[in-house]
């Protein structure tokens, strides 16, 4: 299921990796004369497309930016998508100790979400997780 999900939703799962790897390689190349890199074939073409001379190209800020929301998409719809991806990829994201904001696509700063809304989001996530 994980392989199928990544194959059919590569624009969601591989894009952040490709952007980050491109930014990392560009920084590495600035600090060294040569570099040997081993990439998987799915990443080669996107990295070649993102590799542009300065001032263009990808940097770490672009590589770690959360894309803008689709117009008319509610928070509950986004949480349902997160639950579906969690089931498809078998990730259990909230079990990771380094996750401080489980809803970065709703609000970048978790402290700006009030407690009642956060409880509602978590409840909605778990309801959808059980549903799928």
Image (spheres, rainbow, N blue to C red):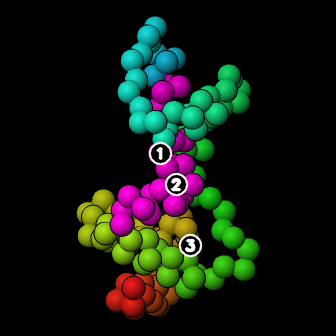
Quarter of image, res 124:
bottom left
Mark 1, secondary structure of its residue: helix
Please identify the quadrant where the N terminus is shown: bottom left
First reached walking from the N terminus: tag 1 or tag 2: 2
Tag 2 residue: 10
Residue at (52%, 54%) from the top-left corner?
10
Query: Label 2 near label 1: C-beta < 8 Å?
Result: no
The mark lying in front, picked from 1 and 2, is 2
Q: Which residues are magenta?
A: 1-27
Residue 87 can be seen, yes or no: yes
Can you give x and y, in whole percent of width and height, for residue 107 in the image?
A: 55, 70
First reached walking from the N terminus: tag 2 or tag 3: 2
Tag 3 residue: 106
Query: Label 3 near label 2: C-beta < 8 Å?
Result: no
First reached walking from the N terminus: tag 1 or tag 3: 1
Q: CA distance from mark 1 to mark 2?
A: 10 Å
Crowd around label 1: few <14 · some 14–19 · many ≥20 (10 Å): some
Can you give x and y, in whole percent of width and height, for residue 61 in the image?
A: 57, 43
């Amino acid at each position: 299921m994980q392989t199928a999900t990544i194959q059919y939703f590569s624009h969601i799962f591989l894009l952040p990796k490709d952007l980050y790897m491109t930014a990392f390689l560009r920084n590495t190349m600035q600090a060294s004369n040569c570099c040997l890199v081993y990439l998987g074939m799915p990443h080669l073409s996107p990295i070649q497309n993102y590799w542009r001379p300065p001032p263009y190209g990808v940097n770490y800020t672009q590589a770690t930016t959360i894309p803008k929301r689709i117009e008319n998409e509610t928070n509950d719809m986004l949480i349902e998508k997160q639950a579906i991806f969690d089931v498809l990829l078998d990730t259990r994201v909230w079990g990771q100790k380094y996750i401080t904001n489980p809803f970065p696509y709703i609000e970048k700063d978790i402290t700006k979400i009030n407690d009642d809304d956060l409880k509602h989001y978590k409840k909605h996530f778990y309801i959808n997780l059980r549903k799928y």
